[in-house]
Amino acid sequence: MNDITVFIYFICFAAVAGATFAFMWRMTTIALKEANKPIKRSVHPEMQDVKSGEQLLVFKTDEDEDDEDDVIIIRK
């Protein structure tokens, strides 16, 4: 190899290394911003009319347990 080929090789190597570092830095920044955003929890469409604290009718298939406890919905 002559000197020009080696120079071109190192210029391309530096460009790829710089682009890789810039890409990793940008993706890390985006990931950290996404992690700091508050989570939006959407309500299921069938549960939109149900208020917090209302009792619901629940069907359980466990025949061994005979609990008669009511289920109370609590929205956060």
Image (cartoon, rainbow, N blue to C red):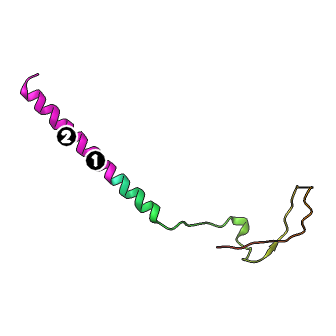
- Gap in Å between the C-alphas at discs 2 and 1? 10 Å
Task: Give the camera-side residue of 47 and 18.
Answer: 18
Q: Which residues are magenta?
A: 1-25
Residue found at x 12% / y 29%: 6
**Apparent side of residue 2 relative to residue 10 in the rendered image (left or right):** left
The residue pinned by badge 1 equals: 21
Numbered disc 2: secondary structure: helix
Q: Cβ–Cβ below 8 Å for labels 2 and 1?
A: no
Q: Give percent across and percent down for residue 73.
A: 75, 72
Q: In which image quadrant can residue 57 be found?
A: bottom right
Residue at 65 percent across and 67 percent down: it is 43
Q: Position of residue 45 (x, y in %)?
A: 69, 65
Quarter containing the C terminus? bottom right
Q: Residue at x 11, y 27 (%)?
A: 5
Query: Relative to 14, does residue 22 appear above or below in the rendering?
Result: below
Which residue is label 2 attached to?
14
Spot occupied by residue 65 in the image (x, y as percentages of width and height): 90, 59
Amino acid at dot 1 = Phe
Query: Is 9 above or below relative to 35?
Result: above
Magenta segment includes 71: no
Tell whether 17 sits left or right of 53.
left
Residue 7 found in image quarter: top left
